């Protein structure tokens, strides 16, 4: 229905059907509590870092279809990294039930069930005002009752900057 663009400074221009939301950070507890209070959609498509991310045109539909079919609290998918003319597939791991690792790679986009997130908050409490661990807290709460489902399909590509050593190799 609409896109909520999170920003920490000057919001800039807002395209149609977009709403700007000033936040301390995209992964903070306060941000997630605000988002969950405001959205009216069944799903939230979260880009932890949208810089250089290009979605496959079928990505939103595939993620929603998968969430509907599995009943998962969140769905994430494989992606590729592109550096210059080199494309590297980047499959991600299946989520392990009970995994507490905070650096788990969900890839550049994650579809969250708004209902699953809200139920987990009602059951386990609001997300504390963590600056960096709000997303971590939310995904742990969701995963206590619902699966976090890995869809083994590449649904996005991330542009990577070339490191100086790679620039020289690419010219050789």
Image (cartoon, helix red, strand yellow):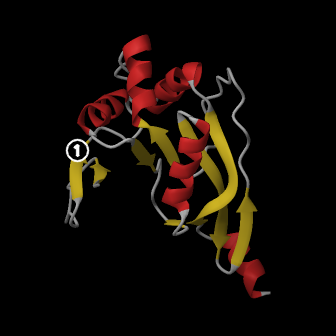
Quadrant that contains the N terminus? bottom left
* Residue 156 vs residue 63, the one in the foreground: 63
Name the residue at the bottom extreme: 171
Residues packed near mark 1 inside 10 Å, few (<14), some (14 to 19) or many (20 plus): some
Q: Residue at x 71, y 48 (%)?
A: 92
**Quadrant of residue 38 in the image?**
top left
Q: Does the rendering let one see residue 135?
A: yes
The one of 128 and 1 positioned closer to us in this rendering? 1
Q: Residue at x 38, y 41 (%)?
A: 42
> Can you name the residue that lies furthest to the front here?
69
Name the side, left or right, on which 169 lies relative to 99: right
Q: Depth check: 110 or 160 in front? A: 110
Q: Residue furthest right?
A: 172
Q: Which residue is mark 1?
A: 22
Residue 122, given in percent of the width and then of the height, sits at 37, 15
Q: How many marks?
A: 1
**Image quadrant containing the C terminus:** bottom right
Q: Position of residue 20 (x, y in %)?
A: 22, 52
Residue that appears at 53% across and 33% down: 73
Q: Residue at x 72, y 76 (%)?
A: 86
Q: Is residue 67 above or below residue 20?
A: above
Above or below, 69 relative to 98: below
Which quarter of the figure has residue 12?
bottom left
Residue 132 location (% of width, % of height): 44, 31
Residue 19 lies left or right of residue 68; in this view the side is left
Q: Secondary structure at mark 1?
A: strand
Residue 108: tell me if it is visible.
no
Q: Is residue 43 left or right of residue 56?
A: left
Q: Position of residue 103 (x, y in %)?
A: 62, 35
Q: Is residue 80 above or below residue 98?
A: below
């Amino acid at each position: 229905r609409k896109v909520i663009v999170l920003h920490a400074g000057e919001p800039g221009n807002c395209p149609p059907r977009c709403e700007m939301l000033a936040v301390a950070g995209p992964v903070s507890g306060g941000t997630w509590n605000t988002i969950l209070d405001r959205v009216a959609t069944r799903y939230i498509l979260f880009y932890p870092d949208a810089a250089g991310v290009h979605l496959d045109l079928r990505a939103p539909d595939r993620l929603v279809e998968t969430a509907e079919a599995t009943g998962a609290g969140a769905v994430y998918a494989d992606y590729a990294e592109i550096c210059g003319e080199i494309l590297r597939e980047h499959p991600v791991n299946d989520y392990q039930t009970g995994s507490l690792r905070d650096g788990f790679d969900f890839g550049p986009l994650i579809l969250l069930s708004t209902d699953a997130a809200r139920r987990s908050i009602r059951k386990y409490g609001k997300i504390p005002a963590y600056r960096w661990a709000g997303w971590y807290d939310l995904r742990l709460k969701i995963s206590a009752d619902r699966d976090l489902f890995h869809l083994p399909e590449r649904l996005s590509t991330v542009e990577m900057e070339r490191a100086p050593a790679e620039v020289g190799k690419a010219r050789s």
